[in-house]
């Protein structure tokens, strides 16, 4: 049985990359809601509606586990997704990364960057503060709404992206954080650039900790595949001009042509 | 009876501004498909599907005319829209601006900037070449996919926007155009910046020529309002964080809270 991996666009590929790294024998069904990308500036009810439809798609495809490879959907729609998923386990982005950030910080000052919707939800702040045994933590959340279109355009190493990143991250520099959650699955593709601006800060890639969580879960319920090569199926709600090129650049290998699927 | 004005987001407000300027006594129903913005990187069939739904919304609201205040929908979906609209006249962006550009050029070198979908469709090139009586015209189309998110973020006067604009427009400088169609309704908000990069080029605001076309049409069928103040109703498919602020900044006056509407 396959693992369903869901994002609004190409961002979830950073999670897929981590999944393949830590679970190299699984069959993955990747669903990108490219007809309605981006989610990050949209309202709670809209993101919940789209996330429920994605979950139904995975149930129709009989998956053994769903990875919500989108921080906005994780922050805004996890309960809606779980309600539809019923017995199928769901791994989202917020909890594993919050645990990792709490363990990583030495000075108790943690930054979170994400879409406007994720930051406004304060999902990360609430989750990180659950680990704050001594009431010391300070969490600084900054919305970086242009990072998603910049990544979707493949403008990873670009002076304009650097300028925009400097503008977004300047206040985090002032806040003297030592740990930063890359709270959007698009952001690991900007990791080098962010690290240049915040050189001594530990960056938390939400996909990595989510992948480790998936591994733990499948090991504990005896559903981990060990005897086959990984297999990838890509489904998109729209087949835009850039997906395949960008996906291959990001994953570092060739992929098969994505199939089109209608969710609405 | 009202005039329906349709765009994926805030871009159509540049058209609404021109409509109010040239037809100051009308009732306008503005529909922004903010749940699925942007359209510009999406496929033909997806843009057609969304445009048909918008047209049905206007028919339910009994409008006397529909303005497709989105160049991507104008380029990709005009036939789908007209089929649904039936007897309700539809004014789109491409034809009036193409006529204006053809009249404006002195050296027969015309640039068109737009979304990836608009440029790929070659709708402008085909339309402009219809006016090319002496087989002289050269049309240079450039996709500027990041202009929409930059405008939607209100980053009108920003060094990063300037860098990105320089990158996009550099080849048009080389091409020695004397006329440039701003082939996306978001772009008039970047007019000053574009004019700085291309100082001697006549910029064609598609909304302005579409508004003049609407006026001509309503005068000819006796449906022009002359005896009331203009009235505005805003409908959005999502109510995002930024719309009202941005709309007020762009229009230059306060607006009433937009109403939410579901198209799908």
Image: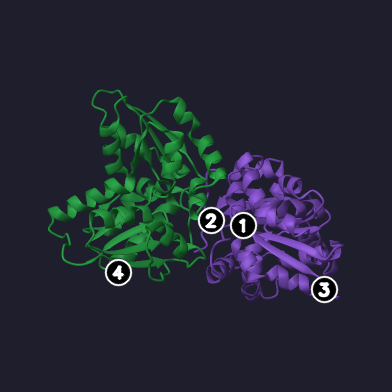
Chain colours: A purple, B green
Please give the residue where the numbered disc 2 appears in the rendered image: A237
Decide: marks 2, 1 in contact (CB < 8 A)? yes
Q: Earlier in the sequence, mark 2 or mark 3?
A: 3
**Horizontal and vertical percent for residue A197?**
73, 47
Mark 4, chain letter? B
Residue at 82%, 63% in the rendered image: A100
Q: CA distance from mark 2 to mark 3?
A: 40 Å
| Residue A217 picture quarter | bottom right
**Horizontal and vertical percent for residue B164?**
54, 40
Decide: marks 2, 4 in contact (CB < 8 A)? no
Please give the residue where the numbered disc 4 appears in the rendered image: B60
Q: CA distance from mark 2 to mark 4?
A: 27 Å
Decide: marks 4, 1 in contact (CB < 8 A)? no
- Helix, strand, or loop for circle 3? loop
Q: CA distance from mark 2 to mark 1?
A: 8 Å
- Helix, strand, or loop for circle 4? helix
Please give the residue where the numbered disc 3 appears in the rendered image: A132
Residue at 43%, 33% in the rendered image: B198
Of labels 3 and 4, the one closer to you = 3
Q: Earlier in the sequence, mark 2 or mark 1?
A: 1
Of labels 3 and 1, the one closer to you = 3
Please give the residue where the numbered disc 1 appears in the rendered image: A31
Q: Describe residue A183's horizontal placement relative to residue A38 as left or right.
A: right
Decide: marks 2, 3 in contact (CB < 8 A)? no
Q: Nearer the viewer, residue B36 or A218?
A: B36
Is there one chain holding both mark 4 and mark 1? no
Mark 1, chain letter? A
Vertical relation: A157 (above or below) B263? above
């Amino acid at each position: 049985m396959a693992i369903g991996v869901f994002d609004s666009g190409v961002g979830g590929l950073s999670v897929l990359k981590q999944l393949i790294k830590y679970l190299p024998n699984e069959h993955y069904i990747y669903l990108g809601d490219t007809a309605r990308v981006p989610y990050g500036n949209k309202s709670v009810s809209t993101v919940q509606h789209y996330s429920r439809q994605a979950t139904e798609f995975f149930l129709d495809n009989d998956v053994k586990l769903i990875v919500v490879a989108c921080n906005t959907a994780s922050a805004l729609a996890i309960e809606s997704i779980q309600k539809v998923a019923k017995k199928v386990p769901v791994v989202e982005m917020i909890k594993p990364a919050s645990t990792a950030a709490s363990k990583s910080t030495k000075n108790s000052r943690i930054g979170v960057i994400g879409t406007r919707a994720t930051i406004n939800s304060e999902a990360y702040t609430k989750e990180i503060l659950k680990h704050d045994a001594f009431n010391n933590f300070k969490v600084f959340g900054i919305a970086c709404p242009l990072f998603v279109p910049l990544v979707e355009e493949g403008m990873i190493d670009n002076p304009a992206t650097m300028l925009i990143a400097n503008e977004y991250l300047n206040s985090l520099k002032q806040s003297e954080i030592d740990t930063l959650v890359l709270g959007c699955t698009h952001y690991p593709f900007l990791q080098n650039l962010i690290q240049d601006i915040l050189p001594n800060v530990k960056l938390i890639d939400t996909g990595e900790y989510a992948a480790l969580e998936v591994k733990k879960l499948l090991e504990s319920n005896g559903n981990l595949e060990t005897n086959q090569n990984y297999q990838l199926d890509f489904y998109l709600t729209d087949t835009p001009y850039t997906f395949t090129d960008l996906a291959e650049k990001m994953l570092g290998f060739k992929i098969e042509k994505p199939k089109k699927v209608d969710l609405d």
